[in-house]
Amino acid sequence: MKYQIINKETGIVAHGMVVVQDGKLCFFDPVNRTYMEVDNQSNHEIKLTRMNREEIARVCHQVNKAYCEAIGDFSQPTWEDAEDWMKESAINGVELHINRPLAGAEQSHESWMREKVNAGWEYGTEKDAEAKTHPCIVPFSMLPVEQQAKDFIFRAIVHALAGGKS
């Protein structure tokens, strides 16, 4: 979960995570890599903040990259190295599940496939961004189970991080 800590005296805000360090509740600031103990006498207030859509898309992308590598596909770049169209596709997937919380894995795939086809992609046995071919441009029911799993995982991440229902 993402938190912000606010100094009640100065109004300075930092973003980070709440963790237990040496048995004490602490705020971890990942930018400065520091821990600050938080207790009832502290001049700080901690608030839970929601991740924005791009942050959720980044998590989805990175988990998808790790999953792909687990099944032998090392073609996925990191979020930081991903092309803009790839990031936009992930953000669109996040928006689908936030705006249509009952949309399932099949609708997720259909939305992704429609986006690809509208951008000029077509079915091909090899994934090739230059040639705009992809082996997953087929109906959801024709995808191998390990490819279907990506849509279930993506949806679950969005719902977990956006606070929706799975």
Image (cartoon, helix red, strand yellow):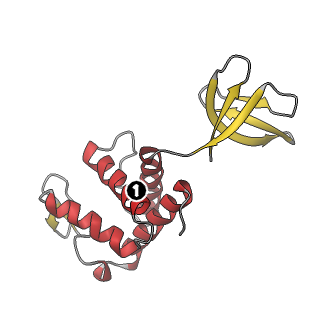
Estimate the x, y position of residue 64 in percent, counting from the top left: 43, 58
- Whether 145 is drawn above or below 22: the answer is below
Left/right placement of residue 20 relative to residue 144 reads: right
The foreground one among 23 and 10 is 10
What residue appears at the point 43 percent right and 59 percent down from the top-left corner?
A: 98
Q: In this view, does 110 lie to the left or right of 20?
A: left
Residue 69 versus residue 54 in the image, above or below: below
Whether residue 152 sits left or right of residue 142 in the image: it is right
Taking depth in this image into account, of 78 and 7 the one nearest to the observer is: 7
Per the image, label 1 sits on a secondary structure element best described as helix
Residue 78 in the image: x percent, y percent?
Answer: 40, 45
The structure residue drawn at horizontal position 12% and vertical position 56%, both measured from the top left corner, is 131
Tell me residue 108's x, y (percent): 35, 68
The crowding category of the residue bearing disc 1, from other C-alpha atoms within 10 Å (few below 14, some 14 to 19, many at least 20), is many
Q: In this view, does 135 lie above or below 36?
A: below
Identify the residue position indicated by label 1 in the image: 94
Q: Where is residue 118 in the image (x, y as percent from the top left)?
A: 15, 60
